[in-house]
Image (cartoon, grey):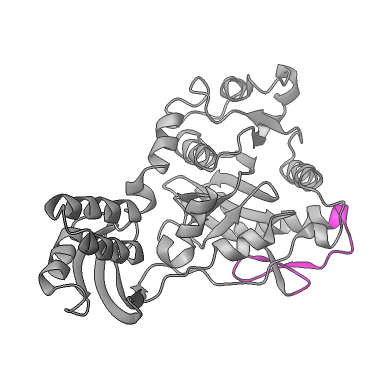
Amino acid sequence: MLIPFSVKNCFQLLCNSKVPAAGFKNTVKSGLILQSTSNDVYQNLAIEDWIHDHINLEGKTILFFWRNSPSVVIGRHQNPWQECNLNLMREKGIKLARRRSGGGTVYHDMGNINLTFFTAKNKYDRMQNLKLILRALNAVQPQLDVQATKRFDLLLDGRFKISGTASKIGRTSAYHHCTLLCSTDETSLSCLLRSPYQGIKSNATASIPSLVKNLVEKDPTLTCEVLINAIAAEYAAYHQTDNHINLINPTDETLFPGINSKAKELQTWEWIYGKTPKFSVNTYFNVLYEQLDLEIKVFIDIKNGRIEICNIEAPDHWLPLQICERLSSGLIGSKFCPTEATMLTNILLRTCPQDYELHSKWNMLCEKI
């Protein structure tokens, strides 16, 4: 059910933002400018879904600013094993999220501004939004050479990508969201968005690698706060609304009923990994054992994030055929993740409690897979 975009509803949305009621009466004539007080990627993505699903945007617009602690966000139709370094992310405690819009994979941290433009479906216009950002950038630094591309990216100096675009178009409403690299950790971005996995074949949407650069490298005064305020001012001028940025708490059920269940859904394995389009892995790796370099071949088909077909080939003198077959059959139906492989090693330890050498070999394979 859509909630009418009224003064009353706006007050409910903003009652925790410490904005006097008189401060946004004019805002509701054409829209709102919001900013999240949270840096949690799942909470902020949930707010996007909530606004899209519940607010009637006919004749109205919303601009939503949000920033996240370090995290990697993949598009709705992407394969995380292809897009990022999952092992490194686990080591560093970097969150992985799958958004409901399409597009490519992005790295988020506090130096990367996220902007979401909400409109009615018939007013959806990505290029208009990007031109608005360009005007804001030129207002604070006229010397910047930034242009929008046909792919709806923003390029600095004709080479460096500072913004990527994705969108979701619903039955009556739509949103276009984009990033803006201000002072992000470029080393983390480069390392985390490089998959180490070999032999993956998939029809999932693949990201297109690009050179990137932070805006603060061109001008140290272009902080996130300066850019947010400049874009808010340009947005307000264009839409003839108040330029006040209203703070919202994306965990407040009194303002956003059902919001926490949306955030929890976005954190589930079934959504993040299980929504990956079907793919296969055809690869090999080597293990060192008693000064021997042994080649192991692995063939796996994965559907909905779970192993559907599995075949592991290892030298019979190192790991007997029946053990390889047991490992292969044991993996079928399990999640394609290290936790499931670890569980299988425990199963083997119980079935062969005295064969510690065999367990060591099995464990070695599971870690590689």
Could you tell me which residue is drawn at 51 percent across and 58 percent down?
A: 88
Could you tell me which residue is drawn at 32 percent across and 78 percent down?
A: 284
**Magenta residue check for 146:** yes
Could you tell me which residue is drawn at 72 percent across and 28 percent down?
A: 26
Q: Residue furthest left?
A: 322
Residue 4: % across, % down: 51, 28
Residue 29: % across, % down: 67, 32
Instruction: Provide the residue span drawn in magenta.
Output: 138-158
Residue 4 drawn above or below residue 112: above
**Magenta residue check for 26:** no
265 left or right of 83 in image: left
Towards the viewer: 349 or 29: 349
Q: Quadrant of residue 178?
A: bottom right
Towards the viewer: 162 or 79: 79
Figure label count: 0
Residue 155: % across, % down: 71, 68
Residue 223: % across, % down: 80, 48
Image quadrant occupied by the C terminus: bottom left
Q: Answer whether residue 329 is visible to the viewer in this image.
A: yes
25 left or right of 118 in image: right
Q: Answer whether residue 78 is visible to the viewer in this image.
A: no
Residue 120 drawn above or below residue 37: below
Image quadrant occupied by the N terminus: top left
Could you tell me which residue is drawn at 16 percent across and 52 percent down?
A: 353
Towards the viewer: 333 or 320: 320
Residue 185 drawn above or below residue 309: above
